[in-house]
Image (cartoon, rainbow, N blue to C red):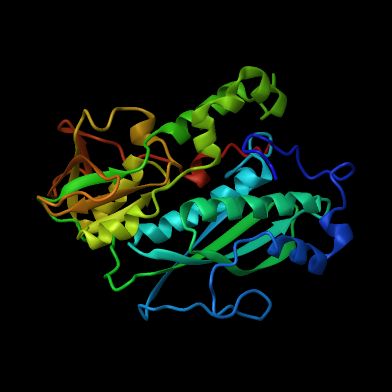
Amino acid sequence: MDAPNEAWAGPTAGEAGPTVGEVGELAVLDRIVRRLPPGSPEVGPGDDCAVVSAPDRRFVVTTDMMVHGPDFRWAWSSPADVGWKAAATNLSDVAAMGAVPTALVIALAAPQDTPVTVLESFADGVRQAVDALAPACGVVGGDLSTSATFTVSVSAFGDLDGHAPVLRSGARPGDVLAVSGELGPAARGLARLFRDGVDADGEPSRAATLASGADTDPDVARQRRPVPPIADGPAAAAAGATAMLDLSDGLAIDAGRLARASGVTLAFDAEAVPEGPALHGGEDHGLLATFPAGTDLPGGFRRIGSVLDRGDHDLLRAGVPVPTSGWDPYADWDGAAG
């Protein structure tokens, strides 16, 4: 099992053991599935579809992709890190609807010369994330293919447990704006890697990451393995949250989405939301929610502002308009892999 800071150099065979191309799909699937958390589906992996119970008679579903290059770099993350992050980001989306995660479906496309141990380690990371964040959830199916670029696609399902889904469109003037989870460490960690984890040509480098001490930076650890507050999503729904979403691309850009969906302006308290990574950094995967005034905020939620009538701007901080900027893979990826 990989330690959180044990990175993989890329798709090479040799000492790492047989590759996926040498072993074949059936054997690879067998080695992966046995490492994944099973959950409690009515029918799990092995048939054309899984059967998952939906006690609420409704379920939420989300899909997210992670692609080598724009979403992760092997010089900076181990296969287990990538597995953890792939699971955590989707579990967070389910929680943001106020639902309890129940099942994951994972599709992987890997180069032919990828060592099988890499996929096993990826599966270990998925299991570690599920065990830590949503232990009642499980991996109930998926697919395996080959590609020149390592690609992960995860679909997550969740049960609403009798609550109405918490949408982005329900915030109302007078509501309290609150957040659960961290703001800024993942962005600070990524900035550290781009500064200290590169070689003389500016390419991601495992050796430079180790030599600079970036590998042991707690912010880098949060970039590799976010810890979204999954249980606080259903808790927010039970407490009467009027709107909610996952903070994946950065507080400013995601809060702007909530403001536009609800037709309101969000005003940040300056002392609660400092300038910099806390405002514009992404990948922390906390939860942003609005609650009626006077609500006892549940779980780890803390007030960071208020909801105002719609004005000329989506966001304000100390009365000053805030740009709704954040991560955009089409604009921000530099085309490198590493």
User: Exactly how many numbered labels are in the figure?
Assistant: 0
State the residue in front, 320 or 35. 35
- Tell me, yes or no, if residue 176 can be seen here: yes
- Describe residue 29's horizontal placement relative to residue 153 as left or right: right
- Describe residue 290's horizontal placement relative to residue 59 as left or right: left
- Describe residue 122's horizontal placement relative to residue 305 as left or right: right
Residue at image x 32%, y 40%?
Answer: 252
Residue at image x 20%, y 46%?
Answer: 177
Which image quadrant for residue 250?
top left
Viewport quadrant of the C terminus: top right
| Image vertical order of residue 315 relative to residue 189, above or below | below
Q: Position of residue 317 (x, y in %)?
A: 20, 33
Which image quadrant for residue 42?
bottom right
Q: Position of residue 174 (x, y in %)?
A: 9, 50
State the residue in front, 209 or 126. 126
Residue at image x 90%, y 43%?
Answer: 14
- Tell me, yes or no, if residue 149 can be seen here: no
Q: Position of residue 58 (x, y in %)?
A: 37, 77
State the residue in front, 191 or 189. 189
Viewport quadrant of the N terminus: top right
- Describe residue 163's horizontal placement relative to residue 249 as left or right: left
Q: Position of residue 254 (x, y in %)?
A: 34, 47
